[in-house]
Image (cartoon, helix red, strand yellow):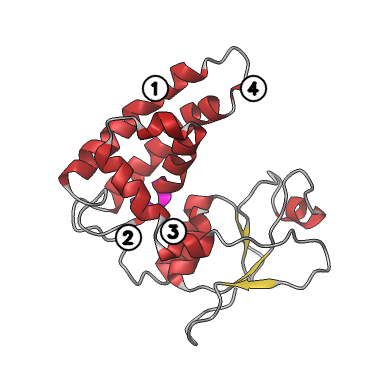
Amino acid sequence: MRARLALWKAEIECELREVVLRDKPPSLIAYSAKATVPVLVLDDSKVVDESLDIMLWALEKRDPDAWLSPKREDLEAMLKLIWVNDHEFKTHLDRYKYPNRYEDVDPLFHREQAERFLADLNTRLSQHTYLFGAQSMLADWAIAPFIRQFANTNRAWFDETPYKALKVWLETFLNSPLFKSVMRKYPQWHEGDEPHYVPEPASGSQEPL
């Protein structure tokens, strides 16, 4: 999701292949041995298969809203916060959301551990609208999809938490036109299918991959 968010924002036209991981097309495995999504294949056949790396690649080409240049702190600080999200928080999120995939896991323990990150984000968001100031930045768009997953694991519980600023921030993300565009459904891609090109061209500025 976050890879698509950055590609949409940068208006970089891509051929989209929507895959189902339980029915992986051979080309996915050929391009990336880890065979998970996202996988971005460039014109020169270079493969970028980490979502944050795709975000950075896209925004380094075109960053119309200056997501990489926060008014408060800097890119290094954003990347540190994203690292905590991607490694520490996601570890607990996975075990909270999918406890059956792991041995001897107490999902409520991992929810409690994950709450520490929620509290830290809420503290930031109590001081300003977004994580690094008055405008959304890379960190907001990179982290919000994971908070969405966490919230949806038990929405009734999440709605009762005291993280008021975090909940407002999440709703702003969910209601954004960019998020709604990215969440559009596409049919599963099979070898030989006609491609979908995204984002749909709004001007002549898109740069095909």
In the displayed orientation, state which residue is furthest to the bottom: 204
Checking the image for residue 68, the label placed there is 2
The Cα–Cα distance between marks 3 and 2, rounded to whole angstroms, is: 8 Å
Residue found at x 54% / y 58%? 183
Q: Which segment is the magenta one?
A: 139-143
- Lateral position of residue 68 relative to residue 25, left or right: left
Q: Nearer the viewer, residue 155 or 135?
A: 155
Where is residue 130? Give x, y as percent: 26, 51
Front position among marks 1 and 3: 1
Residue 71 coordinates in the image, percent (x, y): 19, 58
Residue 209 in the image: above or below residue 120: below
Report which residue position mark 3 lands on: 56
First along the sequence among labels 1 and 3: 3
Mark 3 or mark 4, which has the lower sequence index? 3
Question: Tag 1 or tag 2, which sits nearer the N-term?
Answer: 2
Amino acid type assigned to the residue bearing label 2 in the image = Leu
Closer to the eye: label 4 or 2: 4
Q: Amino acid at mark 4?
A: Asn
